[in-house]
Image (spheres, coloured by chain):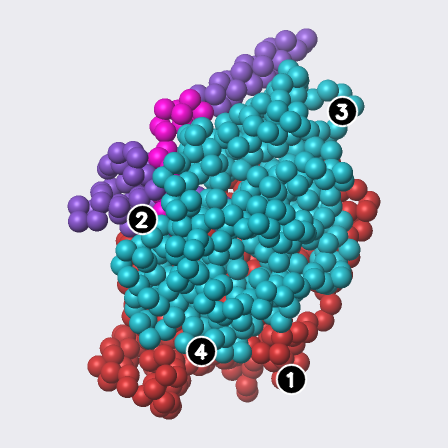
Chain colours: A purple, B red, C cyan
Amino acid sequence: MCLGIPGEVIEVLTDRPDLARVDVSGVKRAINIGLLSEEAVGPGDWVLIHVGFALSKIDEGEAKAAMEFLEGIGKAYEDEIAALRDSEIL
Amino acid sequence: MSAPPSEREQQVLDRIERARKRRAKVREERITLSHGAGGKATQTLVEAVFLDAFRNPLLAPLEDAAAFTVDGARLALTTDSFVVSPLFFPGGNIGDLAVNGTVNDLAVSGARPLHLSTGFILEEGFPVADLIRVVDSMRAAADAAGVAIVTGDTKVVQRGKADGCYVNTAGVGVREHPGELGAATVRPGDAVLVSGPIGEHGVTVMLARGELDIEADLVSDTAPLHGLVAGLLAAAPGVRAMRDATRGGVATILNEVARAADVAVVVDEEAVPVAAEVRGASELLGIDPLYVACEGRLVAFVDGAHADAALAAMRAHPLGRQAAVIGRVRPDPPGLVLLNTTFGGTRICDLLVGDPLPRIC
Amino acid sequence: MRFVDEFRDADKARALSAKITSLCEPGREYKFMEVCGGHTHTIYKHGLEDYLPENITLVHGPGCPVCVIPMGRIDDSIHIARRPGVLMTSFGDMMRVPGSGGNFFDSNAEGTNIRMVYSPLDSLKVARQNPDMHVVFMAIGFETTAPSTAMTLLRAEREGIENFSVFCNHITIIPAIKAILDSPDLRLDGFIGPGHVSTVIGCRPYEFIARDYGKPIVVSGFEPLDILQSIYLLMLQLREGRAEVENQYSRVVPWDGNRTALRVIAETMELRPYFEWRGLGFISHSALRIRGKYARFDAELKFEVPGVRVADPKACQCGEVLKGVLKPWECKVFGTACTPETPIGTCMVSPEGACAAYYNFGRFTRTRVREASLS
C-alpha cells in the first residue's frame, strides 16, 4: 500500500494536461499528474507514482547528493579496510 | 549480523514447522479464487479433497504427469484445463496454451508427446470465427510439437457461463528417457536451472485485460519445450527432475520440489533472468516475478557435477538461449526455499496463498 | 531501474553497516520503530536485519492501513457489496482481510461482485462502463492515498457521474504515532519515519516527536540503503545528543509536503471525531470521512452500514504487534492457528503486515538461513 514507484515522464497529453505517459523500466502507463499542478512537469522528469497518481517530482539533485553520500561512505569504508589490511604486522 | 533466534523464538519456529507438516484440511465451505491460484490454497485443496478421494500410488507423486508401464511400454499421462482471460493476447491464445501446456507436462516427465485429446466448453453466443482462430492455433501448435489431436468433445452452456470458451487437453506420451525423473530424486548438491526469462506470460495476459492502462512490449512465452528437453536429456546425465513453470511461477515449483524431496533450495536473486519490462510491470503492480506464470519455461534440477553441460544444452536450443543456473539444493533447512537477495541479505521465499493475477492460464 | 537499483547496492550496505556498528555504545540496546508497513516489508524482503548489529532492534509499527482496519468495517463493506446492483472495487491487499463472516473472496463465493482495482480512477472507469450498476470504491490508506481518492471524487463530480460512491476508510498517521509515544509498554530510541505519507504531509508534522518527546525521527525512503542510511542518521543523532526531524528521502519528500494534495483532501474530506483502529482502539481525529458537499458520493450515507463494532477474535494479538510490543513470533497463535493461509488477524493478511513479512520472508532469517546460504 505504501507502494510508490519512480517513473520517467515521456509525454504530457496535450488534450488532457492532467495526464502524462510514464515509463517504468520499459513499461508505459498513463498516470494522473493533477497533484503536481504547482510544478512544471515535462518529458524527462521523474515522478513518484502511487495508485495511478504522481505524488511528487523526484529531485535529481537530491538523488545525486544521496548517492554521493552513500558513495562517500563506501569509499571511506574501503579506505579503512585497505588501511586495516596494510597495517597488518607481517 | 543480527542475533541468532532466542530459545523462545526457536520453539515458535519449530512449532510452525510441525504445523506446516500437519495433514491438509480445507476450512472454507465454498471454493474461492485462491483455490485456483496454484499456491497454498490449491495445494491444500488437491491434498485434502482430490488426493484423499482418489488416493493411489500413481497419483501420489503429484508430478506434472503420471508415469506408468503397460506391457513394457513406459507411458505418461497428463491433463490441463485452460480458463485464460482474455482468450487472445500478444504471443498467442487459449489454443496455444492448451496444446503447449500439455505437451510440456509430458516433456518434463521425460516423455515424447504422442497424442492429445481436447474438450471444449463453449458459451452460447461465442463467435464461431473466434473458435476457428483458437482451433487453427491448436493445429499449428500440435504440428510444431509433432503431436496429433486424436479425440475430443464439445459442450455448449448458456450465455453468461464459460466466459467465451474453456478448453481442456489431456495427453499421452512415451517415456523414452531411461532414468526415473521426479522431485523425490532431488538431493543436496543439485543445481537448479531455468530455461529462460520468467513471468512473461502472466504479465502479458494481465496487461492484455486492458484494465490497467499499461502498455508494454511483452508477449506470452507460450512454447512447446519437448525439443529443449530432448536436447537437455541427451547432453546432460544427472537430470533429476523437470517442471513446467505455469501458474504460481518458478517460486511455486521450487517450493513443491523442496517439500517433496525434503531439501532446501537456495536461489540467487541476481541469477534469475527477468526481462526489464516484466520487472517494471511487477514493481508497478506490487507483485514478485518469481510467482508470475510462465507458459514456455521449465525448471530443471540437475546433478551439480553436470550443471555446465545442462546449461550448454539448454542454451543450444532456440527456446533456451537465456537459460541460467539460478541456485543450488542444500540439505538444510528442509522444505524451504531461500533467496539470496541482490542486496546481500537472505530471506525465505514461501508459497503464496492466493495469486494477485487470477485467470492467467 | 533508476532510483531503485542504486539504492540496493550490497557494498554500500556493508559500509553503512560498519558505520552503524561503530556508533553503538558497548552494552547499550537500541530500539527503533519503523512506522510504515512498506518499511517492514523492505526490511524482511531484503534481509536487512543481517546488516544490523545485535544490539539494534527494529520494532514494527502500525503504519499499515490494511492492518488497522477493524473487522466491523470489513463487514460493513460486504454489507454494501451485498446490495442489489452494487459492484464494489477494492485494492488487492484488502481482498483477504477477514471480517466476522469471511473476506471479500469468500463473499464473492457467496455471490457478491467485489473486484480488484489498481487505482481509484479505475473504479470510476468501471462506473462509466457499467451504467446499470452502482460502483462503490472501498478507499483505504493514509494521507498517501487520500489525495488520489479526493481527486477521483472531484473528477466524479466534474463529469456528473451518478453511479459511483466511496466507502471512506482513510486514516491519518500522526495520531497513531502519538498513540505509540504515549503507550506505557514501549521504550523507543527513535523512529524511521514514514516515506510516502510525508510526500503529502511534509516533515513538519513530526516536529512534536522531537520537541515534546525528545526522540529523533528520520523520514526514510523504501530501498534497503535508504533504511540503513536512516538508521545511521538516527544513531548519529543519539551519539550527538540531538533529537531532530531529518529527511533522508529528500529526493522524493518535500519538507513542506504537497500543497495541492492537502488542498484536495481538505476540499472533499474532513476529520471524523474518532475512529476505531484495530489493536489501538478508538483514536480521536484520526480518520477521514467525505464532506457534506460531496455527500452523494458517500457510500456510508447511501447504504446505511450496520456499523457494528466487532471485537477481534480472542486469540488475536494484532494490537500488541501493531504497537510493537510483541514481535510476530511472540503472538500465541503465530504460525499455528494464524498463518497466511488461515489468517486470524490483519497483520498476517496484508503483505506489509509484520506477521506476514516475518512468516513469508523472515522466518529462519538468522542463523540457519545464513548457514545454509553460505555453505
- Between B87 and B305, the one lying in front of the other is B87
The amino acid beneath tag 2 is: Ile
**Mark in front: 3 vs 4:** 4
Q: Residue at x 66, y 28 (%)?
A: C213
- Between A43 and B307, the one lying in front of the other is A43
| Chain identity of mark 1 | B
Marks 2/4: CA distance? Answer: 32 Å
The amino acid beneath tag 4 is: Pro
**Mark in front: 1 vs 2:** 2
Q: Residue at x 36, y 54 (%)?
A: C152
- Between B217 and C63, the one lying in front of the other is C63
| Chain identity of mark 4 | C
**Location of the N terminus of chain C (image quadrant):** top left
| Chain identity of mark 2 | A
The amino acid beneath tag 1 is: Ala
- Check if mark 3 and mark 1 are on a common chain: no
Locate residue C30: give its quadrant: top right
Q: Position of residue B351 (x, y in %)?
A: 58, 59
Q: Which residues are magenta?
A: A47-67
Identify the residue under disc 3.
Answer: C28
- Check if mark 1 and mark 2 are on a common chain: no
Tag 1 and tag 2, C-beta contact below 8 Å? no
Q: Secondary structure at mark 1?
A: helix
Q: Is residue A55 magenta?
A: yes
Marks 3/2: CA distance? Answer: 48 Å
Identify the residue under disc 4.
Answer: C84
- Check if mark 3 and mark 2 are on a common chain: no
